[in-house]
Image (cartoon, rainbow, N blue to C red):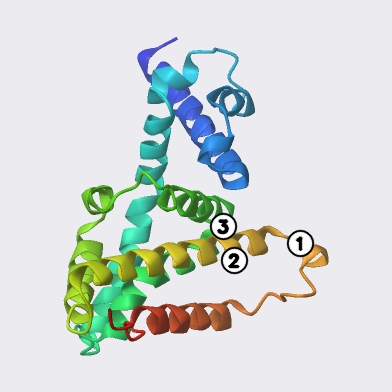
Amino acid sequence: MTPRAATARGTRTRERILDAAERLWAERGVDGVSLREIRIAAGQRNSSALQFHFGGRDGLVLALTRRHMPRIVEIQERIYADAVAGGRRDDVAALVEVLVRPNADYLRGGPSERAWVRVCADLVARPEVAVADVIAHAPAVTLHVGAALHEHLALTMSRDLATERILAVTTAAHHLCADRARAEERPPAQASPVRPRLPFETWRANLLDMAIAAMTAPATPG
């Protein structure tokens, strides 16, 4: 086998493993799937294939993040640029939209994008994820907008509460986007009669309305 053929084969193997991890993690959570299951689902009989390409679970998470985050950041930067162009750079509702809307828009991309939205919701909900971890992995536009929003909130509440408010609302928004991603995957015959699926634009507008209201709710004294 030539070096070029070997490289192409390795790339295909790597992508198959990522596809399998993405799908299984979306269905059952990152901690609910063994690396062996991922390897078998990817059609890899070599027991060391996953370790060779990714090193382990953390390497898989990092590789999937690198697959999806650049495109989500593009959406986020476009939303922020539109807010700035519209004179809403310091508008709280616009800042919340920059933080919340990208995942909502991203899930419309297709099955892979919807799977990542579900995986991402699972990752951000982990209790061991601290504020420092979020900051370390957040893109520049998220940090800039988050800092601006924090300053606004800190005018009416403590800084610790402002931090908690931002983390709580954005985490909840991640889960609501994951719920929508699951709903998008269901065939019409399996739609819930109790909770009908709203048209996407209506659902997204409601998501933003709820996020803005929660973020800006008055803090109870004491």
Q: Earlier in the sequence, mark 1 or mark 3?
A: 3
Q: Residue at x 23, y 79 (%)?
A: 157
Mark 1 or mark 3, whichever is nearer to me: 1
Query: What residue sits right under mark 1 in the picture?
Result: 187
Viewer-nearest residue: 110 or 152:
152
Q: Secondary structure at mark 3?
A: loop
Label 3: how many Cα within 10 Å (few below 14, some 14–19, many 20+): few
Label 1: how many Cα within 10 Å (few below 14, some 14–19, many 20+): few
Q: Residue at x 63, y 29 (%)?
A: 41
**Would residue 79 appear left or right of 44 to someone viewing this image?**
left
Q: Position of residue 38 (x, y in %)?
A: 57, 29
Q: Earlier in the sequence, mark 2 or mark 3?
A: 3
Q: What amino acid type is highlighted by mark number 2?
A: Arg
Query: What residue sits right under mark 2 in the picture?
Result: 180
Q: Residue at x 48, y 13 (%)?
A: 48
Q: Position of residue 34 (x, y in %)?
A: 56, 27
Query: What residue sits right under mark 3 in the picture?
Result: 110
Q: Secondary structure at mark 2?
A: helix
**Would residue 7 appear left or right of 179 to someone viewing this image?**
left
